[in-house]
Amino acid sequence: MNSELTRWTGPEGLPRFDLISDQDFAPAFDQELAAAEAAQEAIAANPAPATFENTIAALETAELGLGRVLSIFYTVAAVDSNAARQALQRDFAPRLAAYGSRTSMDPRLFERVRHVASDMADLRPQDRRITELALRDMTRSGAGLTGGARKRMAEIRSRMAVLTTEFTQNVLTDEREYALPVADDQLGGLPDWLIRAMRSAAAERGHDGQVMTLNRSLIVPFLEHASDRSLRETVFHAWTARGTGNGAGGADSNNLPIAAEILALRHERARLLGYADFASYKLAPEMAGNADRVEALLGQVWQAATARARQDQARLTELLHEDGRNGALEPWDWRFYAERLRRREHDFDVSQVKPYLGLDAMLGAVFDVANRLYGLEFAPLEAQLWAPDIRAWRVTRDGKLMAIFVGDYFARPGKRSGAWCSSLQPQHKIGKGQRAIVVNVCNFTPPEAPGAQAFLSWDDARTLFHEFGHATHHILSDVDWPSISGTSVAQDFVELPSQLYEHWLEQPEVLDRHARHFQTGEVLPADLRDRLIAAGNADAGFATTEYLESALVDLAFHRGEPPQDILARQNQILEALAAPAAIPMRHAAPHFAHVFAGDSYASGYYSYMWSEVMDADAFAAFEETGNIFDGATAKRLEQSILSRGGSAPAEELWLAFRERMPGVEALLKGRGLA
């Protein structure tokens, strides 16, 4: 086995990706999976009475080697997919599921965990917490099942691992294979920076001229600016065809039967465990607790959002008719006319701002906010990572190493779309302890040439802040055990730090310091800055409605009996909501990776808004002091939430910070929907 996969030898303990090949993963996986199985067997078969040390603490270390191999593999499989890595994913997934079933459902291990959990009076709070979670997770995994039910649960988990992998790979195939040539006479309305990005995308794929890909950082501005309506329609249909079997990957990339089977298996799993449906099972350990509370929150916002959206739709339809086009406003029209309305009402064009939003400048803003809030300092770190344009930083405070931060910011063929935060290794205090190695991944448009300046849209800048908000959860983590480190919290609590961090992007104090013209160094003019911020909620009805459609469809998919016809059920839900036809779901079922690429956000896509209720109230805590960088409030946020990971229930952590539960009013006000 290539030892670099487990004994990382790069600077500050990073892996040396240049020393790892695709051929190294299978032997390393085989060895570390066997080691993890042996460690689990030793714990389960231990003849000594179960104690916290020989059972719960031992479980925390049983998979550390396997975790290191998988963290490298799944990182590169997501950011730089190829045929070999996809084949390995298909091989690893069912084997990991089988291993997970054997260990989490082992009756010997379950009995030992129950024994420790039966008397926790002398345990420290964090030790008690991971014991409670171990018992809860084994119970929810089916450890208490017997006979045929136990066997069926293991079969379900194995099959789910295969299906979720196939779903992800099908979407990625459709995205990777699509490249639409765009002729010079079809470029009307497109800003120069977007045309250059389309030409770079063409060159990257060996084409002349310019192409449109399914990279969201290209799709959205294209739909906002392209004056060729038929081309907008073509691109929109390609974007929404991902995973339908009608995308660039053809019939082999059809996710509809896969999604239907996933829903059926989730429902069966929930019923085996005594729950009415998967939503009841999934929401039981979350802050929300049950689907009725989720629907009540989403319903309040839905009424305000769709009322605003219908007002906006009428105004945008007038603009459509002004162009001599009869008929209804279509989904591929909305962003185009919304951008025209924004320019008209706010005298604001997004292209005016882009020269002030260089990636380096915005990273400076991200790091400055972290310094002023938490005293963090960032120094570039030279390291051999998975692509030449990946960057790394040492994160310190008062000279002490806090974490390593890695940024992978640019779109490339084979990279999964979207943006996310993950960790190559979590923070913990086992043995000598370790600090987090945290990774932010985005899909921004690359610079025109290597070493040239890269520019962000306003939405890109918001994404940059959002993902770094997740990173603060890892960087500031200060817990004993890896299972409760960083973002290992309730799903509807995990988006709080990320969405909270977005607020600082909009502050004049931050923009005046960092948003500078890439050529002149001139600060973003105050009037342009104010128009930018004022225009921020100009299309809030659309943005909120498209999100809520996805969240409500996700929840409905997992309540009651699972649908057999996914698209028919999706359309039925939207019809019952009286959803505006011109506003499609942000993520339709065939490419809804949040829900079908794994269980994390299944019946949990609502969590972004659940967290937003809290993040609006959390930022208000800073505003109430008269100082958005108030040190005492930042310290209380760190000590109550960011440093504590999952060491206590989410509601307890929130109340330690704010001392009361929030209402929806701050969210509606922040979105301009009040």
Image (cartoon, rainbow, N blue to C red):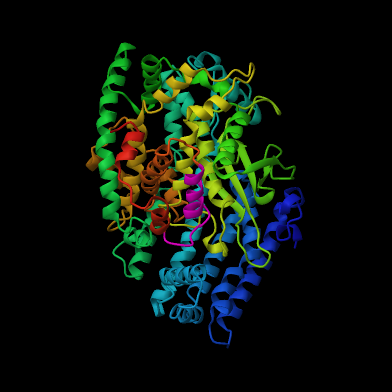
Residue 314 image position (x, y, % from top left) = 26, 22
Please indicate whether residue 343 sits to the left or right of residue 46 in the image: left
Query: Visible in this render: residue 15?
Result: no
Total marks shown come to: 0
Q: Position of residue 566 (x, y in %)?
A: 34, 48
Q: In which quarter of the image is the N terminus?
A: bottom right
Q: Quadrant of residue 279?
A: bottom left
Q: Which residue is drawn at 36% across and 47% down?
A: 610
Which region is colored magenta? 631-649
Is residue 236 positioned above or below 176 on the image?
above
Question: Is residue 647 one of those drawn in magenta?
Answer: yes
Is residue 436 rendered magenta in the image?
A: no
- Residue in front for this viewpoint, 616 or 115: 616
| Residue 431: quarter of image | bottom right
Q: Which of 14 and 554 is in front in this view?
A: 14
Magenta region, main secondary structure = helix
Residue at 47% in and 45% down? 633
Residue 636 location, x and y as percent? 48, 50
Vertical relation: 645 (above or below) 463? below
Closest to the observer: 231 or 605? 605
Name which residue lies at 58% across and 75% down: 40
212 to the left or right of 608: right
User: In the drawing, does residue 622 fall left or right of residue 436?
Assistant: left
Q: Position of residue 503 (x, y in %)?
A: 45, 36
* Residue 291 appearing in the image: yes
Query: Which residue lies at the image location 33% right of the left edge and 39% below the top edge?
Result: 666
